[in-house]
Amino acid sequence: MKKVIVVFIILWLLPASLASERYPYPYYPLPEYSAAVTFGTLSLFQNPAALRVNPDMELMYLHSFNSDKFTGDNTILFARNGLGLAYQNYRLSVDNAINAFTIGYSSHISQGLYAGITYKFMKTDDGNPYHNDHFWNLGLLWRYSREISLGFLAENLRQMEFAGEETDVEYKLSAGFRPLQELLTLSANWSWSGGQSFSDGIFRGFINLKINDGIGILGSVDEDGNFGFGINFSFGYNQIGTYHTYTNDGRDWSGLLYSGYSYRPRGWVFPVKKKFLKLTLSGLYPETDEKDFFLAPERTTFLDLVQNLNRAVDDKIIGGVYVELKKPRLGWAQIKELRNIFHSFRDKGKPVLFYLGYLPGNGSYYLASSGDEIAMHRVDDLAITGLLGEVTFYKGTLDKLGIEADIYAAGKYKSAEDILTRDSMSQYHSEAVNKLLDDIFEQYVNDLATDRDLSRDSMTSLINNAPHVSEEALEAGLVDRILYPNEVRDWTKSSFGTSCSIDFEEYSKRKPYRERWGLPPQIAVIPVEGTLMSGSSGEIPFYGKTVGSDDLAGAIEYARKSDRIRAVVLRLNTPGGDGLAADLLHQELELLSKEKPLIVSMGNVAASAGYHLASAGDYILAQPATVTGSIGVVYGKLNLSELRENIGFTTYLLKRGENADFFSWNTGFSKKQKEKLLYQLNLMYEDFVQIVAEGRDLSYDYVESVAQGRVWSGSAAEERQLVDGFGGLWEAIQMAEEQAGISDDEVEIVSFPKRPFQLFDLWGGLSSVAKSIKILMFGTGIFSDKSDDLGLSSYYYILPYSIKIY
């Protein structure tokens, strides 16, 4: 649609006829950039197509003067998100001035190609030849690569009359070249009018040189020897500069002073006064970018958090970080990754301070222990009580309701059915859960003891005697200070040596100004968060997030076909789900991995169907506390015949086909059906094991020995060759960059698919309420005969249970 609109505008603006005179524009000097190189607010006059290149807000003020006096003309410019506005005041004489208003807009047409238009209107006193003159200009820009840019500008397209005579359209064809990337830019304009041939045009060359991060020099010269020279200084968000033009005999023709503001910093002339980063962690940090209701505050994803904290580690503006913890709902692996980042701050000599609030527990304290100092409120408890795994069984409840769970699993540790078919943990179930807790608890105790400079035995004793009031925590060396919130300011000032700070949310938005030409290569992060299901993603009340195979397949296919995406990180935070969906997505991932690097990053949990997807990757990274494995299959149904009878339902089953009731919840499986089901379960399990064996380049027998539906911690999985190494999301991104042959300074990180917002988060709202009702009524079989009414007739690769670690 954009292309159609642009073509229409071009056709409408084409000159109606040829003229022989140029329009005598009142002269106004500008910092000179060619039509291929211009940027920001100045592009409103030099090539409006560039307005879209850097969409953040910019302001600029210019004051021009001639060689005789400082008084002169003034211009104010504004640009944001492709829209540009300008007001100019030309002083032709003491009593005669022109007020000019310009509006422009630019659109991104395709990769590196931009188109823009401007409309300019001049207002003067009646009788002045410039009175009510107006102009349409058109610009095109092609940022072909990091080194080459091409531009085109057509001015006065409607051929404004001046003194009764129609004037020419004027054209500029421009090219820019960066032999030393952003340090040196060479460019040229070739200008001609509609009344002359192309070969009779005028040449002007330009040079832009970066002396350092905050000082730039610009100059220009034409074929007659007239030239210009200027210098600009950048102070982060603010810029000042001057530019002068000279005739070929060296006479100063005109001068210009200007100042500007940009939403993103453009560099610093002087050493930067450091600030500390203020970060408040509370609530969830989802892996998926979720579009909320337009009035809702924007959510920070875990990728946003990790990416911007890692940027701050190397940012010379940031001298340290202060973190306030307000019950963040982070998983164990997410906490481990953040701990590593805060250790990186400390390694760079940047202090890290934590303030604990709201009854801090195991997770919050584990995160805070990675800092230099920890403070807590005077009237609060430090609840580092250890790890608790809770597994609830529902068989007794189902028995009382008259519901029989006819569910089976392949893999002796695959215990998803246990919570419905048993009232206690089996030997294998207990073995797996206890091993998992032992692994995570050992990591927890060892890390705390190391960070707090305590012995392992002392740390274990402190955990066994928790919770601790603040005075006890201080005396034991668990915290360093007891402070009220209003005392934090003095603490941070003494620790960081400054009271200047920047909030994390603001810092995240103000990424460095991008000077690079062309569209940068991309690394795609594809998050798989929630239970894997066929269809579209959503969220079901009382159940949680579901991630749809349709959405994921589309994202994987797009990443595979996109020329800009050079590598993919598959970010897993899923307990598994639908076996059919997993198999379809595995095939899509295999196609992708044949063309591009595919790095798998395991989050808090990447089990069962999640591991099925992971096995397609070139390299698997996990945290030591990641919950993974669970290579097994489960399937079954609920027999609700007794429940229906108890509440007065009468159902008759009229079959045509011996197994017509195979999926019916009005009856259990017959002996023959059970044999058939177990046979198919084993086939599915063997196929699952074979897929993992091929993906991991291991023997079938070895994978089968570590499979059996058993869950493993990340550390245990690494020992058993189920993962390749330890690392978080950021390490996976860096590995993807390395495999793709690109560097940090030139890559763009993109994440998709995004979970769409619909009315009341429809599918996390209205439709998911309907889905919940359907599960409660049809899913329990009260108003339905078959499990596939809910799309639940697939075999499932899913984590056997949910373990909450407090």
Image: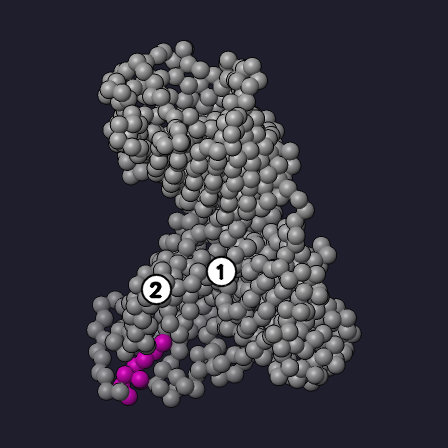
Residue type marked 2: Asp
The quarter holding residue 47 reads top left
Task: Name the residue nearer the viewer: 103 or 150.
Answer: 103
Name the spot of residue 599 as percent of width and height, x first: 56, 49
1 vs 2, front mark? 1
Q: Quadrant of the C terminus?
A: bottom right
Depth order, front residue of 211/166:
166
Looking at numbered disc 1 in the image, what kind of residue is underneath it? Thr
Residue at x-position 61% and y-position 47%: 735
The numbered mark at residue 687 is: none
Q: Are marks 1 and 2 in contact (CB under 8 Å)?
A: no
Determine whether, in the image, residue 575 is placed left or right of residue 494.
left
Q: Establish if 499 lies above or below 23.
A: below
Q: CA distance from mark 1 to mark 2?
A: 17 Å
Q: Which residue has dot 2 on it?
A: 761
Q: Residue at x 23, y 87 (%)?
A: 648
Label 2 crowd bin: few (<14), some (14–19), many (20+), radius 10 Å: some
**In the rendered image, the vertical position of residue 486 relative to residue 169, given as above or below:** below
| Residue picked out by circle 1 | 300
Q: Counting other residues with Cα less than 10 Å from the Cα at mark 1, is it few (<14), some (14-19), or many (20 or more)?
A: some
Where 205 falls versus 804 (above or below)? above
Residue 252, by quadrant, is top right
Main SS type for the magenta part?
A: helix
* Residue shown at 64% from the left, 33% from the top: 211
Q: What segment is highlighted magenta in the picture?
A: 638-646
